Structures are given as structure tokens and as C-alpha cells.
Amino acid sequence: MNHSAGPASAPLIGVLDSGVGGLSILRALRQELPAASFVYIADQIHLPYGPRPLDEIRQFAHGIARHLLDRGAHAIVVACNAASAASLLYLRQTFPGVPFVGMEPAVKPAAAATHTGRVAVLTTAATAGGPLYARVLDRFAANVDVRTVVWPELVLAVETNRIALDDLRPIFDRDLAPLLAEGVDQIVLACTHFPFAAQALRAYVGPDVMIVDPSPAIARQTRHVLPDHAPDRSSIPQASPSSVDYCTTGNLARFTVVASALLGESIQARQLTWQADGSLGPD
Ligand code: DGL
């Protein structure tokens, strides 16, 4: 198959995450690329990715990318910091010619904007221990005190749509309050689940702490890497609404309910199943 062929008309973009977190990226992608179609794959049977070894996450990402390319994806957004840490370089080598967009912790803008010199990065273990995070810390955080918060509870809270401030206050009190007391004035969301908790976070931290959400930047970057650059928003006044094929490897009913709630629209989804040979299929 020739993976470098450009889209004939509207691009098809594959988006992957361990669960519903990547929907925060999908939301931004649909705004940026309203004429595009999407296949969203939530690998919920393997959620959470965060505590898993990087080579295991890499195998999952490989299987999902293979599936998305077989479905005709023109570009793939690895809408998961953990999967990006584990697999982004590998995927680019394995599927040359395919544009892959991945996540890396947005330490650079936080380090540039901090007044106190203290930055918190909210993330998972795989991202915190991965090569992309080490690289951004080396490059951008030499003169900044970075506090890394590994927060599996927040992943699970978003997965179950418990994202009201009252739901989250206990973990905010335990893990965030001490950092705020020490003067952290930038909070980097380095897990794609966390933008869904941004409203509660904002209410908790108040107006003076900046919350850095990379999803709009990821959406812009995706538009730039698409073959034959997709037209931008202003040039497609009559774009038809984008279509999304939502898939999960986990519990279909639960995914449908939670994804609908997080996106604020009623969605339908399909079941995918991992096969013994490491591929994804309908059976
Ligand atoms: N949404 C994923 C990320 O951005 C990870 C959540 C998980 O641990 O599965 O890293």
C-alpha cells in the first residue's frame, strides 16, 4: 500500500488513545478541520496505558496504527502522551511517509510564561519516564523548578465522567494544594484525559494560575502535516459537518455514554477486538 498518497478530497484522520482522553484532541481537530473525517480508537481494554512498560504500549500503538492505515487514514494523531512517549519515533520509522502527530509535555510555553519559576506537569508514569519528557526538560526547563505529578486517579475519574470539582477536590487537596502553596503558577496538562477536568481545575486554582492545554496547537500541527494541506477554516464556509467513526476495544455501552457526556453530543460507537496476531478486527 502506498501510505504517502494524498487525500482525494476530505482527509481521513486516525486518532488513538487508551480511552476517552483523546476526545479532547478530537474536539480541537474537528474545529480546526471541519471538513475532515475521523476514525477514533479508544483502546480501553488496555486502559490505563500510564502504568504499563513502554514496549507494551508501543505494540498496542503499532496494531492501532496498522488498522487505521488499512482503513485509509491519511494521517494519524497519537492523541495520548503515554503512547507518544512509547511509540512516536518508532511509528515514524515503521511507516515512513505517513504523517504522525504526537503529544509531548508542553513545558516550553509554561517555562516561558512562569513568573514564580515553578511549573507543575500533570501526567502519567509512562510519560514521566519516557524519552520525550526527558528531552523537553533538558531543552526548556534548565532554569525552572518543574514538579511532576503522576496522576492515575485523574485518568480514571475522566474515564468514569466524575469530573465535577466536588468529585476531584480530594485529589486536588492532596496533590495540587501543596504545589500551589509553593507558588506554582503554570499547570501543564500532559495527559489527554486532563483537559476534561480543566473546568474543575480552573475553579480550584483560581484565575492567576495558567493551565496549559496543548490540544489547539496539536490540531493546528495536524493541519500542517496533512498531505496537500487541508483548507483552513476560513476557506470552507459551507463545509459539511465532520464525520467520526468512534471505536473502542473495551466496554461499548460505557464508552458511548461517557464519550457522549464529555463531548456534549449523542454519539454512536463500534466494538473492535484485538486478534491473536496483534491486529484489530471486528470479530
Ligand atoms: N490519555 C493518555 C495520555 O495522554 C493516558 C491515560 C492512560 O494512562 O491510559 O497519556
Image (tube, rainbow, N blue to C red):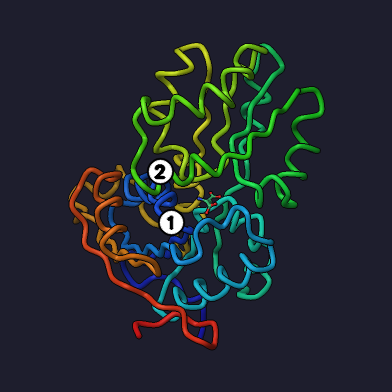
Residue 117 picture quarter: top right
Q: Position of residue 107 (x, y in %)?
A: 66, 33
Amino acid carrying label 2: it is: Val
Kindly identify which residue carries mark 2: 158
Whole-angstrom CA distance, mark 1 to mark 2, is: 9 Å
Residues at marks 1 and 2 touching, judged by CB atoms closer than 8 Å: yes
Q: Is residue 33 above or below residue 269?
A: above
- Residue 220 seen in render: no
Mark 2 near ligand 1 (CB under 8 Å)? Answer: no
Amino acid carrying label 1: it is: Gly
Q: Would you say 69 lies left or right of 88 here?
A: left
Kindly identify which residue carries mark 1: 19
- Report crowding for label 2: few under 14, some 14 to 19, many 20 or more residues within 10 A (C-alpha): many
Residue drawn at x 25%, y 45% is 261
Residue drawn at x 53%, y 76% is 63
- Report crowding for label 1: few under 14, some 14 to 19, many 20 or more residues within 10 A (C-alpha): many
Q: Position of residue 34 (x, y in %)?
A: 29, 51
